[in-house]
Image: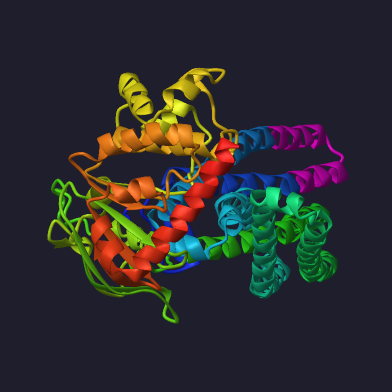
C-alpha cells in the first residue's frame, strides 16, 4: 500500500520506474506528442532543403549561361517557400511542446498532491515539510523543463542528426560515410554523458531539498530563533547548505564542460571536406555538390550544441521523477479499507489490551483496557508523557495499535471504512491549526455545504461570536498563517466552533481549553457540557472543573491504566489520582490567584 487513502484523482500512471512513470504521462497526451515529433521532423527536413538549393545556385553561377538567372531564381523561391512553411511548422511544434509540458506538469502535480493527501501521519511525521515542498514545487517544475525545452530540443536535435545521412546519398552514395560515423559516435557520447550526469543531477536535487527543508524549518520556528537570538547561527547553517547546492551545480557544470561531441563535430567537418574534395577531384561530384554536402554537415551543429543543454535538462528531470516516485511509492501500514463498515457511529469505544509505540524501542501505551459507553463523558488524566494524547490518536486511526484492539460500536477500527470513521470523530488538540482563509471557512471546514446561519450558531455555542464580530471583516476576516494573528484562546474557540459545526457523535478534547481565560472558561464549560449531551466525549485535560463532571475517569501512568472510576471513588482508593488531583488543584489555585491579581 502506498497510501492510506485513495484520494480521487484523474491521474493513474505507471510507478514501477522513473522511465515508465514519465512514459505513462507522455502517453496521456498522444496528439501533442505526435505534433511535437511531426513538427520536429518537418523542421529538420525543410532545413535540409537549403544546402541543396544553395549548391544548385552555386552550379548555376559557375555555368554563366542564359539559364543562370532562372536557376538562381528557382533556388531562391525554393528557399523562401520551404523556410516559410518551416516557420509555420516550427510554430506548431513549439506551441505543442509548451502545451504538452504544461499539461505534463499539471498532471504530475495533481498526482503527487493526491498521493501526499493519502499518506498516513506516520509518513508525514518523518518527512521534513521543506523537503516535501521542494519535491512538490521544484522537482515537478524540473519535469516540466525536461519536456520543454528538454525533450522538445532532443527530438529536434535527433531529427537534424539524421538529415545529413538522409540527403547525402542523393549527392553521392559514398558521402553517407562521414554522417554515419558521426551519428554513431555522437549517440555513444550521449549515452555515456546521460549515465554519468544522472547521479550528479540526483545530488543536485537532493542538496536543494535539504536546503529547502532547513529554510522551511527556520521560518516555521522563526519566533524561537529570534527569541533565542540565534539569527547568526541559523544564517551560518543555511549558508553552508547553500554553498553545498552551489558546489553540486559546479560539479555538474564541470562535467558538462568535458562534452566530447563538440570535438567530434570538428573532426567530422574536416573528414567531410576531405572526402568531398577527393570525390570532386575524381570527377564524381560537382562544385555545387561539395557546397551542398558541407551545408548538410553543418546541420550537425544544432544537435551538438543543443544536446549539451537538453541532456542536462533530461538528467535533472529524470532525477526529479525518481524523487517524486519515492514519495508516491512509499509504503504505509494504514489503508482506507473502502469496503469496511461505514454506518453511523453510536459512540461506544473499547480499548482492549492495547499496546503502541512510535518505534519498536519506544513503547508509549502498554496493556491499556477501558470502555466508554455511548453518550458518556470520560476524562483521561495523567502526568506529562503518560500517553494521553497518543491514546486519542488510536481511535480515529491516525496510528494503528501494535497489538490489542480499539473497538468502535463493537467493530475494530481497522475494519471500519477510514473516511466513515474519521468523518464522525472530531478531535480538538491543544495545538490548534487554522488555515489562511476566512473565519467562516475555517469554522465550516469539514462540512460539504456552507451554511452561514449554522456557522454563526456554532460560533455562539463556542463563545466565539463576540470576538469574531469585532474583527475588521467579521466572519470574512482572513486569518493569518496558522491563525497566529489570533490569541490562543481565540484559536481554541474557533476550533470548538468547527467541532460543533460538524456535529460528530464522538468528540475528543485534547487539553483544548488550556489557553482560555477564566471568564471565558466558564462560558465554554457550559458550551462543552451542552455539546457533550447525546454524544460520546473524551476529555484529555488537567482542568478540575472538567474532571469533576466527567462520568468516568481513566488514570494513566507511564502508558498504563493504573485506576479508573468516578471522581469520588478515585479520591478514596487511588493514590496516583490523589497525587494528580492535588497537583492540578495547586496549579489551578495559583492560576486563579494570578488572574485575580
Nearest to the observer: residue 237 or residue 431: 431
Q: Quadrant of residue 563?
A: bottom left
Q: On the picture, is 286 further left or further right than 567? A: right
Q: Is residue 531 visible?
A: yes
Which residue occupies 58% across, 51% down?
147
**What's the magenta bit mostly, secondary-structure-wise?**
helix
- The magenta-colored residue range is 53-80
Q: On the picture, is 458 further left or further right than 207? A: left
Nearest to the observer: residue 340 or residue 477: 477
Residue 408, percent from left and from top: 18, 57
In the rendered image, the quadrant that contains the C terminus is top right
Q: On the picture, is 339 further left or further right than 14? A: left
Nearest to the observer: residue 322 or residue 353: 353
In the rendered image, the quadrant that contains the N terminus is bottom left
Judge whether 311 appears above or below 103 on screen: below
Q: Residue 161: say if magenta.
A: no
Residue extending furthest toward the front: 572
Residue 153, percent from left and from top: 65, 52
Which residue occupies 30% across, 70% down?
561
Which residue occupies 55% across, 52% down?
136
Residue 453, percent from left and from top: 32, 19
Give the image's coloring scheme. Answer: rainbow
Judge whether 555 appears above or below 589 on screen: below
Q: Quadrant of residue 150?
A: bottom right
Amino acid at each position: 500500500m502506498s497510501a492510506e487513502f485513495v484520494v480521487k484523482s484523474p491521474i493513474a500512471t505507471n510507478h514501477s520506474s522513473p522511465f515508465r512513470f514519465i512514459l505513462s504521462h507522455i502517453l496521456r497526451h498522444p496528439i501533442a506528442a505526435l505534433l511535437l515529433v511531426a513538427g520536429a521532423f518537418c523542421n529538420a527536413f525543410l532545413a535540409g532543403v537549403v544546402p541543396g538549393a544553395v549548391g544548385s545556385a552555386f552550379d548555376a553561377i559557375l555555368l554563366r549561361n542564359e539559364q543562370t538567372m532562372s536557376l538562381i531564381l528557382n533556388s531562391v523561391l525554393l528557399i523562401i517557400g520551404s523556410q516559410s512553411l518551416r516557420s509555420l511548422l516550427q510554430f506548431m511544434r513549439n506551441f505543442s511542446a509548451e502545451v504538452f509540458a504544461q499539461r505534463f506538469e499539471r498532471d504530475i502535480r495533481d498526482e503527487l498532491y493526491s498521493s501526499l493527501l493519502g499518506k498516513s501521519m506516520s509518513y508525514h511525521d518523518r518527512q521534513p515539510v521543506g523537503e516535501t515542498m521542494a519535491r512538490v514545487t521544484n522537482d515537478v517544475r524540473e519535469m516540466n523543463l525536461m519536456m520543454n525545452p528538454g525533450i522538445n530540443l532532443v527530438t529536434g536535435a535527433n531529427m537534424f542528426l539524421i538529415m545529413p545521412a538522409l540527403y547525402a546519398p542523393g549527392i553521392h552514395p559514398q558521402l553517407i560515410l562521414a554522417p554515419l560515423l558521426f551519428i554513431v559516435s555522437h549517440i555513444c557520447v550521449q549515452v555515456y554523458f546521460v549515465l554519468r550526469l544522472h547521479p550528479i543531477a540526483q545530488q543536485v536535487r537532493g542538496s536543494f531539498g535539504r536546503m529547502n527543508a532547513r529554510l522551511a524549518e527556520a521560518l516555521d520556528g522563526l519566533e524561537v530563533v529570534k527569541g533565542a537570538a540565534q539569527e547568526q547561527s541559523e544564517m551560518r547553517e543555511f549558508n553552508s547548505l547553500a554553498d553545498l547546492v552551489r558546489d553540486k551545480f559546479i560539479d555538474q557544470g564541470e562535467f558538462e564542460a568535458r562534452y566530447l561531441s563538440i570535438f567530434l563535430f570538428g573532426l567530422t567537418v574536416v573528414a567531410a571536406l576531405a572526402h568531398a574534395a577527393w570525390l570532386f577531384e575524381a570527377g564524381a561530384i560537382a562544385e555545387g555538390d561539395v557546397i551542398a554536402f558541407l551545408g548538410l554537415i553543418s546541420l550537425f551543429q544544432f544537435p551538438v550544441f543543443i544536446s549539451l543543454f537538453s541532456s542536462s535538462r533530461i538528467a535533472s528531470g529524470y532525477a526529479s521523477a525518481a524523487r517524486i516516485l519515492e514519495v508516491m511509492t512509499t509504503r504505509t501500514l494504514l489503508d482506507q479499507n473502502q469496503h469496511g463498515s461505514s454506518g453511523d457511529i453510536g459512540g461506544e469505544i473499547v480499548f482492549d489490551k492495547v499496546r503502541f509505540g512510535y518505534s519498536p524501542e519506544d513503547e508509549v501505551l502498554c496493556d491499556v483496557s477501558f470502555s466508554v459507553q455511548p453518550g458518556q463523558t470520560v476524562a483521561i488524566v495523567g502526568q506529562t508523557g503518560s500517553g494521553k494524547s497518543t491514546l486519542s490518536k488510536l481511535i480515529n486511526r491516525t496510528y494503528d495499535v501494535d497489538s490489542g484492539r480499539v473497538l468502535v460500536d463493537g467493530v475494530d477500527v481497522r475494519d471500519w471504512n477510514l473516511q466513515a470513521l474519521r468523518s464522525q470523530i472530531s478531535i480538538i488538540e491543544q495545538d490548534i491549526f487554522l488555515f489562511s482563509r476566512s473565519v467562516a471557512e475555517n469554522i465550516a471546514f469539514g462540512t460539504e455545504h456552507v451554511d452561514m446561519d449554522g456557522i454563526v450558531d456554532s460560533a455562539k455555542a463556542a463563545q466565539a461570536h463576540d470576538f469574531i464580530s469585532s474583527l475588521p471583516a467579521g466572519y470574512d476576516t482572513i486569518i493569518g498563517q496558522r491563525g497566529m494573528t489570533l490569541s490562543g484562546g481565540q484559536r481554541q474557540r474557533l476550533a470548538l466552533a468547527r467541532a460543533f459545526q460538524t456535529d460528530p457523535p464522538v468528540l475528543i478534547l485534547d487539553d483544548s481549553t488550556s489557553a482560555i481565560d477564566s471568564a471565558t472558561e466558564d462560558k465554554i464549560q457550559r458550551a462543552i457540557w451542552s455539546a457533550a449531551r447525546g454524544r460520546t466525549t473524551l476529555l484529555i485535560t488537567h482542568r478540575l472543573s472538567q474532571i469533576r463532571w466527567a462520568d468516568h475517569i481513566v488514570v494513566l501512568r507511564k502508558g498504563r491504566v493504573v485506576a479508573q472510576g468516578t471522581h469520588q471513588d478515585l479520591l478514596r482508593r487511588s493514590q496516583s489520582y490523589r497525587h494528580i488531583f492535588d497537583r492540578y488543584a495547586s496549579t489551578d489555585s495559583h492560576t486563579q490567584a494570578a488572574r485575580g491579581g
